[in-house]
Image: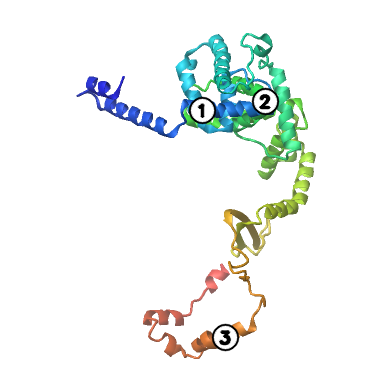
Amino acid sequence: MCLTCYNAIVVNGSSTYVEHAAEWARVLKRRRNDNLSMSESISLLTNIIFEREVIGNDPHIVTFSQLKLIAEDKNDQLSFFFNEIEEMACLGRKNEAERRALERSLAYQCYLMCWNQYMAIPLWNLRDESTANEDNLSWIDCVNILTKLLYNREKNEQEPVIYSFKQLRKEMVAKEFRLSSFFDSIYNASLPENRSSKYLDKLNKKLAVECYVICGNQNSKLIAFKKDISLFVDLMEVSTEAIDALSYAGITISRRHLDREKSAIADNYPYKVTLYLKNKKNNALVLNVDDYHNIHTKRTPDTCSTSSAAHMTTLLLNSVDSMAIPRVTPNGISIHNPKLIDSDLICTFLDSYYMGRMAKTFNDQLYYEVSLDKKLENMTLHKYDDRIKE
């Protein structure tokens, strides 16, 4: 129904209908202006499939959801193209069996559209049983694949734990697209429909943790998640017995293992700082120095404990996503003083600036600039003996 007919029906009606019509028009206009056309989307998808399967010799993508995920990961402008196909096919209103059949059919149609544009794109048989069962991995097979990917990510790539289920799914499916159904089953089993955004945010973290726990049960060397939990509970001053009890439950590593990890972190810290500075050498750096000096601590011991003044300095180094100040001017002249300490410059400033101020008497310099109340305040003696004694 066009906007004119819609307004003719709801004239003098509720303002909600009018606002809905206006919003519908704005969305339609934004879609037309911001998104790729059908032909542009097919051309872009054709290039992605060609690079993946013809040049890269990767296997076919036989489900629509996997094709959508991989294509959008390459170029997010294809989201509108795939969403329109889903809406036209009413994919969300199908049952499980219809959805599975429609998934393969829509994927084949996308391949066919790309093949019509560039016949080097390989087509697969829609009724071929080998391709029909290619993506139907068992639960154990999916856990095996995910465990290997996480182990390689932790040991070889030296990457930290992913605490977001969405991010974990995106990275793992990009490496092995057949894991898509595995992640879907975990997410759907938690019944996320009609849940609040706050609950979904917590669920996003819980499901990521569950994936690490499941894979950790298969490979005991997958300890990145357990190590993070162990460091956290140790920071909370949990007892040794409690940490060992949690390690028996598979939640943390043992206390002895934790001590070795803490020593390794301390030994590796200078290298990590050096590597960070090396990688950020062309960026501007901001160094924050927090000098904590507690002078109000008790000095006299009581019957239970003793205490002393606390001194601690914390250094926090942040890099800025901008280039550092150049060491030379556009003319090739260094901005730094080659003499480091220039005695001539110091004498010049002493003679022209500081000596002129120091030669003035107090009255000449401040008599007319400082109020009488301020002068009296400066001459007042404040006694702190009672406070010091207390």
Q: Position of residue 176 (x, y in %)?
A: 67, 26
Mark positioned earlier in the residue sequence (3 or 2): 2
**Residue displayed at 71% across by 36% down:** 224
Amino acid found under the numbered disc labelled 2: Val
Amino acid found under the numbered disc labelled 1: Ser
* Mark 2 residue crowding within 10 angstroms, few (<14) / some (14–19) / many (20+): some
Q: Position of residue 131 (x, y in %)?
A: 66, 13
Q: Position of residue 47 (x, y in %)?
A: 59, 29
- Badge 1 vs badge 3, beta-carbon distance below 8 Å: no
Q: Which residue is mark 2?
A: 54
**Residue displayed at 62% across by 20% down:** 181
* Total numbered badges shown on the rendered structure: 3
Query: Which quadrant of the figure has residue 136?
Result: top right
- Determine whether the residue tagged by mark 2 lies in a helix, strand or loop: helix
Q: Which residue is mark 1?
A: 41
Q: Is residue 178 above or below residue 76?
A: above
Q: Which residue is mark 3?
A: 348
Q: Is residue 289 left or right of residue 2?
A: right
Mark positioned earlier in the residue sequence (1 or 2): 1
* Mark 3 residue crowding within 10 angstroms, few (<14) / some (14–19) / many (20+): few
Q: Is residue 339 left or right of residue 68?
A: right
- Determine whether the residue tagged by mark 3 lies in a helix, strand or loop: helix
Amino acid found under the numbered disc labelled 3: Thr
Residue 205 visible within the image: no
Give the spatial CA distance, label 1 vs label 2.
19 Å
Q: Quadrant of the C terminus?
A: bottom right
